Image (cartoon, rainbow, N blue to C red):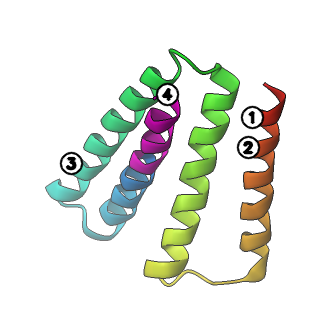
Amino acid sequence: MAWIYLIMSGAFEVVAVTGINQIVKHKNLKSYLIVLFGFIVSFSLLALAMKELPMGISYAVWTGIGTVGVTLLGMLFYREPKDWRPIVFIGMILIAVVGLKMTT
């Protein structure tokens, strides 16, 4: 169950960061509420996951999901450049997270 919490936590981090992007564009209450909701849920789920998983792997996976998720959302929905270099680095993040999991 801890891994499910961790994955969901990373997904809600993506929600929160997307809300930050909306704040930059619109500065309305809805955008602020999305950020607040996203981070509250994300940190709460991260805390639940860390009851069973080590802090290092939890944080690495959480930030990895957030980084990969926000980068892909930016490319797919916010017209950010679709260059091959970010894809390579996303792959490196995924390899690093798998490596951490295999060694802990």
- Inspect the magenta stretch and tell me whether residue 2 lies in it: yes
Q: CA distance from mark 4 to mark 3?
A: 26 Å
Q: Is 28 on the left-hand or right-hand side of 17?
A: left
> Label 2 crowding class (10 Å Cα cut-off): few <14, some 14-19, many 20+?
many
Residue wearing tag 2: 97
Image vertical order of residue 53 relative to residue 30, above or below: above
Q: CA distance from mark 1 to mark 3?
A: 34 Å
Q: Tell me the amino acid under the disc marked 3.
A: Leu
Q: Tell me the amino acid under the disc marked 2.
A: Val
Is disc 4 placed on a helix, strand or loop? helix
Residue at the location (82% across, 41% down)? 99
Lower position in the chain sequence, tag 2 or tag 4: 4
Residue wearing tag 4: 2
Residue at the location (79% across, 69% down)? 88
Image vertical order of residue 18 relative to residue 53, above or below: below
The residue most toward the top is 51
- For marks 4 and 3, give the one nearer the viewer: 4
Q: Is 72 on the left-hand or right-hand side of 17?
A: right
- For marks 3 and 2, give the one nearer the viewer: 2
Q: Tell me the amino acid under the disc marked 1.
A: Lys
Residue wearing tag 1: 101
Lower position in the chain sequence, tag 3 or tag 2: 3
- For marks 1 and 2, give the one nearer the viewer: 1
**Magenta-drawn segment:** 1-12
